[in-house]
Amino acid sequence: MPTPPREGSLEAPTRHPLGWEDEEFYDEAAFEKEFLRVAEVCNSCRRCFNLCDSFPILFDRVDESENFSVDDLTKKDIKDTVDGCTLCDMCFMTKCPYVPPHEFNIDFPHLMLRYRAIQHKKGKTPFADSQLVKTDRNGTLARPVAGIVNWATNKKHKKVRTLINNIADIHPDASLPKYNSRTLLARAKGSKRIINQDAPAYGKRKIVLYATCFANYNKPAIGEAALDVLAKNGIEPKMVYPACCGMPELEQGNLDQVAANARKVSETLLPYVEQGYTIMSLVPSCSLMLKFEWPLILPEDEKVKKLAAATMDFDQLIVDIEKNEGLAEGLAPVKGGVTLHLSCHSRAQNIGQKSTEMLSTIPNTELKIIERCSGHGGTWGIKKEHHDTALKVGKPVAREALKVHNAFVASTCPLASDHILEGMEKQQAGAAPARAWHPIEILAMAYGFAPHQ
């Protein structure tokens, strides 16, 4: 007698390489067959109904079909299901009982990614979308005219912003990241921080700070706060930024470009790894790419494997220092309390609540933790088609932040933190703090450093 299938899995989830260089990966008939197989499992389970918009769309289309069957799903139903996915990975990491090594072998986010890769290969990625994700080019072009760009993208300047919205298909209410006239690399090069030789970790850590495109071009204050904290703890890191990790391109299914970025960045960072350096990433999405997505895209690349093993998220590294050498003295309470949102890509790394542990080292400070999707989803959340849904998904987060009303709202994802403030403002005008924070900025303030701009 054959062994009956198990109802769920008790093993830790594992992921298979994407196989994106195989011809079958782009076979639309093979994809649709696999989609219907996965949809059948998801429809019979429905455990993930409240995670994002993909699952309600899928289940509603099945319920509204003639035979209440996944076999009735149309190509439009499949497309709409894919369009609702933000690649947050929460269904795979926290909800689905049928992920590998279970025999059902369900990896919903990577199935959605496969659809987008097929569309990208067919040239069906919208032009505006393909241009929004060119973060290095956009950051380089915007830097000399950052003031003008920030003025033009401000929601208050409706005439110019309307033109931008129409060209790029951006929702008029969506907050867009600001650019900075001085990159993080430029700021770090001119830095004259005093390295604390009395810190327990002094002389014991070799760290490369991977700047990430967002910290380099948009919010260098995050990186400067990290440099402050590391200097206080006796560490002078190398600041390196070869290129974007490719997460924005991944969202569009441009796997060729993601692989190219992975090869370029790993080529630059590997010599440091071989000298015993730990790679510290400032943004969880980038950490996730280096640690998990790149090895699945380039499973035979030894450089990528070595880099993945040497990479830590910013909070993961600070907690590791705290547990092994100990943090430097001098942390003082943060008055007014901190609301800390743990982003999906922090949770998807499967490292625990490291930002919670990190900020818990600050004495006598109220800390409210929110562990739920903010709804932003990178470029997904700013689009006209998705912005209202992004706010709906993130409404519980904004509502909880309003309820505790702490002075500081921080998220491990800098895009999520701004989105949360927007959601708070939507629910209660004038109630959101003036700005959002990154957890490393909170720790820097607790050490007495003034916030950077």
Image: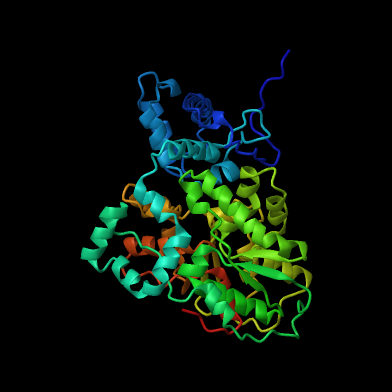
* Foreground of the two, 97 or 35: 35
Residue displayed at 35% across by 48% down: 127
Q: Is residue 33 visible?
A: yes
Give the residue displayed 29% in from the left and 68% down from the top.
152
Which image quadrant for residue 19? top right
On screen, residue 376 above or below 414: above
Q: Position of residue 327 (x, y in %)?
A: 71, 76
Question: Residue 202: x and y, percent?
Answer: 76, 79
In depth, the one of 105 and 22 nearer the eye is 22
Q: Residue at x 32, y 47 (%)?
A: 385
For residue 161, side relative to residue 254 (left or right): left
Q: Residue furthest top?
A: 1
Is 144 or 60 nearer to us in this picture? Answer: 144
Q: How is the image coloured?
A: rainbow
* Pick the front one: 221 or 271: 271
Asked whether, in this view, residue 82 is left or right of residue 226, the answer is left
Residue 416 visible in the snapshot = no
The answer to whether 193 is drawn above or below residue 395 in the figure is below
Q: In x, y percent, where is residue 228?
A: 61, 79
Rendered view: 229 above or below 211: below
Instruction: Quadrant for the N terminus, please.
Output: top right
Image coordinates of residue 434 in percent, x first then y, are 39, 74
User: Is 378 located above or below residue 117 in the figure?
Assistant: below
Q: How many marks?
A: 0
